[in-house]
Amino acid sequence: MRPSTPPPAPTRYRDGTSWEAWAGYSRAARAGTFISVSGTTAPQGAERFPGDTYGQTAAALRRVIEAVEALGGVDSDITRTRILLVPGADVDAASRAHREILGHVAPANSLYFVAGLVGEGLLVEVEADAVLAPGMAVSEDQAVPG
C-alpha cells in the first residue's frame, strides 16, 4: 500500500464584501482544477440597477467571471451557471444578459424562480462552476489560502 498524499487545501477568493465576513464564506473556492462561485449578486445592485433585471444579471455575471479569473481561470472555463430570479424579475432580460456575456461559452445553465433573495431590491443571483485545464496557476494577488 502506498502512502497517500492529501490533496492541497482549497484556495479561496474573497472580493471584500461585508457579507463574506458576516456569513463566513468566500466569493469562490478552487480545489484542484475545479472552481465553485458562490451565489453572486450585482454590487449595490438594488441601488445601481433598481428594478433592472438585465443590469443586475450582467453585473453579477461580470463579478462571477472576475472570481474565476482571480483563481486562475478564464470565462471559457465556466461549465455551469445557475440564475435565481425573484418573482416579477424579467426572465428574458436575464437570459439576454447571459447570452451576451457567456453565449460564446454556452455553459450548462438553469434558471429558477425563488421566493426571494436576501437583500432588499435584489432581483437576480448567479452561481457558477468552472473546470480549468490541469496546471493552471492561481492569481496570488487576490487568492486567499484555504
Image (cartoon, rainbow, N blue to C red):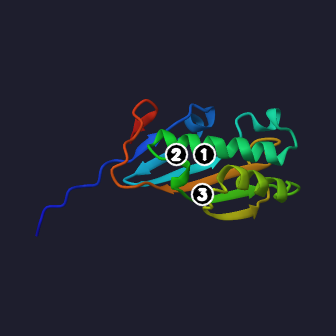
Q: Secondary structure at mark 3?
A: loop
Q: Residue furthest bottom?
A: 1
Rendered position, 44 above or below 61: above
Please state if 135 lies on the left or on the right of 79 as rendered: left
Q: Amino acid at mark 1?
A: Val
Q: Amino acid at mark 2?
A: Val
- Along the line of sight, which residue is nearer the eye, 109 or 16? 109
Q: Residue 51: x and y, percent? A: 88, 43
Please state if 46 lies on the left or on the right of 140 as rendered: right
What separation in Å lies between label 2 and label 1 (alpha carbons)?
6 Å
Q: Residue at x 83, y 58 (%)?
A: 92
Q: Amino acid at mark 3?
A: Val
Q: Residue at x 85, y 57 (%)?
A: 87
Q: Residue 124: x and y, percent? A: 75, 50
The N terminus - image quarter: bottom left
State which tag comes first along the sequence, 1 or 3. 1
Q: Residue at x 67, y 57 (%)?
A: 103
Q: Where does label 3 land, which residue?
A: 105
Q: Residue at x 68, y 49 (%)?
A: 101
- Residues at discs 2 and 1 in contact (Cβ within 8 Å): yes
- Residues at discs 1 and 3 in contact (Cβ within 8 Å): no
The C terminus - image quarter: top left
Q: Where does label 1 land, which residue?
A: 64
What separation in Å lies between label 3 and label 2 (alpha carbons)?
14 Å
Please state if 10 lies on the left or on the right of 92 as rendered: left
Please state if 45 lies on the left or on the right of 15 as rendered: right
Q: Secondary structure at mark 2?
A: helix
State which tag comes first along the sequence, 3 or 2. 2
Q: Residues within 10 Å of mark 3 (few under 14, many from 20)?
A: some
